[in-house]
Amino acid sequence: MSEHIGNPTNQYTVPSVSITTARTGASSKANALGMRAMQERAYAKRGEQYLLIKSPPASGKSRALMFIALDKLHNQGLQQAIIVVPERSIGGSFADEPLSQYGFYWDWQVAPQWNLCNAPGVDEPRVAKSKVDAVRKFLESTDKLLVCTHATFRFAVEELGIDAFDNRLIAIDEFHHVSSNPDNVLGSQLGAFIARDKVHLVAMTGSYFRGDSEAVLGPVDEAKFETITYTYYEQLNGYQWLKSLDIGYFFYTGRYVEAIEKVLDPRLKTIVHIPNVNSRESLQDKEREVNEIMESLGKWDGVDPVTGFHLVKTKEGRTLKVADLVDDSDPAKRSKVLTALKDPAQKNNRDHVDIIIALGMAKEGFDWIWCEHALTIGYRSSLTEIVQIIGRATRDAEGKERARFTNLIAEPAAEQAAVAEAVNDMLKAISASLLMEQVLAPRYEFTPKNNGPKDGFDYGEEGYKDGGHNIGVNTDTGQIHVEINGLTTPQSPEATRICKEDLNEVVTSFLQDKTVLERGLFDKENTLPEELTQLHMGKIVRERYPDLSDTDQEAIRQHAIAAMNITQQAKLALALADANGGTAQGSTALLDGVRKFINVRDLDIDLIDRINPFDAAYAVLAKAMDEKSLRQVQASIAAKKVSIPEDAARELAKRALQFKNERGRVPDINSADAWEKRMAEGVAAFARYRAQAKAAQAQGESGNG
């Protein structure tokens, strides 16, 4: 992973993070049953009643489900399998597959009348009755497989009842659409299915977190699921062709259609997602926006009568084929374009289409293997959506060595009335970029210092050394073992699981905390790193896992901050090496950065807590933004600083008590150490809050007397 500036054409500069992979080919190699690595891992758990598959776009989740479903039908006594997808276009992922040709025991065959995604009509209550009737008929039949949308399934469950689905497999694709929020109907129905305990469930998601603000499952329900995790790092490392992925943001002023030519390279196969009509970036005329984007590419030269693609002639004389998925004024025309894009005969034809312009479509489940660039205008409120959009460009295809995601963001301007809104959008874009860096990094295995080498890890030529900077690599999984002095070890099985599998979920919550982002990026003079790493991250962990012990909560906090800070410092170390004339090439780029960071210091948890997790992001941001705008944003954030709130004061008082137990004295408010001084200020503030509460209580009691 390294900071990267520029692109192959040198037409523009997009500060970004570049992830370099090993290209082992492992994720595309099939075993004797025709299963790729992720599918084999999922199939090994096929006997579980409740399965949750967390695996990135393009890793083969649809086929993994086919293998599992067929085994449940033939070997586990289940009556039928119902596959539930978020929108009709994704139903194509579950079309017939001759799996036996590749070594499996059975073929996947859905009778035409039971693929309801191919049936006409939209999924609204007033027109969904025929589809609900179809589900009823399927349940009464001896046929085995049905594919329908989330909406059709919701209506069917409402009308037919939970018990109508007993002894069946329900497989939910793009599971992040579900939420434990009582207003989420599918989420409530899922809870009812689990409570009745008469179905098998397979849930699949390409996201690495349960949702952006709402949990997908409640903790009790989630504990019943066996989780299969296949990381983005494993997926990309195992590709045959794609060797790097760049993630970056580009700031613009004025109208986005005038800035887009700086980042839209006509030589790259690109999906452009234009902004929602209600967003700040939108020009409120989507058809005109599409036309102006095409004008930036070249001169319009008609429409292909077969595909419906626009033909645009560039200055160099090339004719680009542009698919417009935005214009919905003529359903027949739009249907022609969609049909052409999904034409299976053209799947491996690189020259079939050059650029796709979309608004809400072409995100989830949209499979265009040749896409090299996912270009999105305006921030996306959902980090899940960002993961899905990036997934459009991360397919492996012959000759495709590089992929990129660019977020085009409106820069806050001095004369702009809605500066706060612009800053908010910018923070969300940076948050998404940082999260993706974490998702794409290898998983860490953290242990206390001198705990001994771990099985399956390679510690290099010199091997493991007591007291040394021990960094081991598991070449099969890409995991990195790092020793940290003073690290708290999780005590319970649940905390151990979280530290191994769910750190990205904790980091997601941290990165979505607006105060954390504002203070960490733009109020560095007034913000101590420990306020972010200890107070804010500590609060997030306590709120996420309130039933865990203090020791387990502290262990999770330390592991999450270590994962984020080591990734970010590795990125900084590589950027510094690049600036000094060095290079970090090949699949070991991130590992090289980790070694550069760790080898110059004795790594302990106190040191990690004293690093601002946003230092590396700020270094990239400073190159991306106009200096005047950057200063303006810093001033607006610093102006919002308030006195220590009560919950922060309470946490500071707890940290002060820890300090006293370790040092034998209370923190000194006049200390030269800024963190010790802040703890003392917290103790004083907490004492004031307590005194105010007592005074209010006494006044209330005297008033009642």
Image (cartoon, helix red, strand yellow):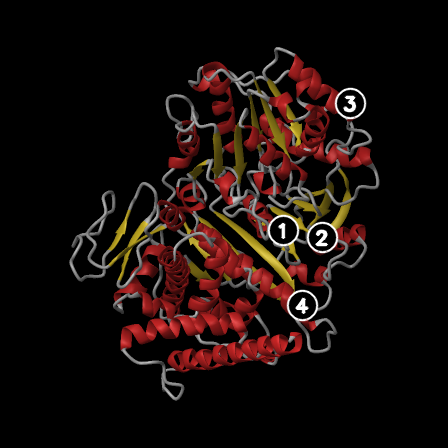
Proximity of marks 3 and 1: CB atoms separated by less than 8 Å: no
User: CA gap, disc 1 to disc 4?
Assistant: 29 Å
The x, y position of residue 362, in whole percent, is: 65, 42
Please tell me which of labels 3 and 1 falls first in the chain. Answer: 3
Q: Which amino acid does label 4 sit on?
A: Ala
User: CA gap, disc 2 to disc 4?
Assistant: 31 Å
Total number of numbered discs in the rendering: 4
Up-down relation of residue 245 to residue 161 (above or below)? below
The x, y position of residue 1, in whole percent, is: 41, 57
Q: Nearer the viewer, residue 86 or 24?
A: 86
Tag 4 residue: 422
Q: In which quarter of the image is residue 447?
A: bottom left
Q: What residue type is labelled 1?
A: Pro
In this view, the residue farthest toward the top is 142
Please identify, in this view, whether the residue under mark 2 or under mark 4 is nearer the observer: 4
Tag 1 residue: 266
Tag 3 residue: 130
User: CA gap, disc 3 to disc 1?
Assistant: 45 Å
Q: Quadrant of residue 697?
A: bottom right
The x, y position of residue 608, in whole percent, is: 35, 67
Disc 4 element: helix
Proximity of marks 2 and 3: CB atoms separated by less than 8 Å: no
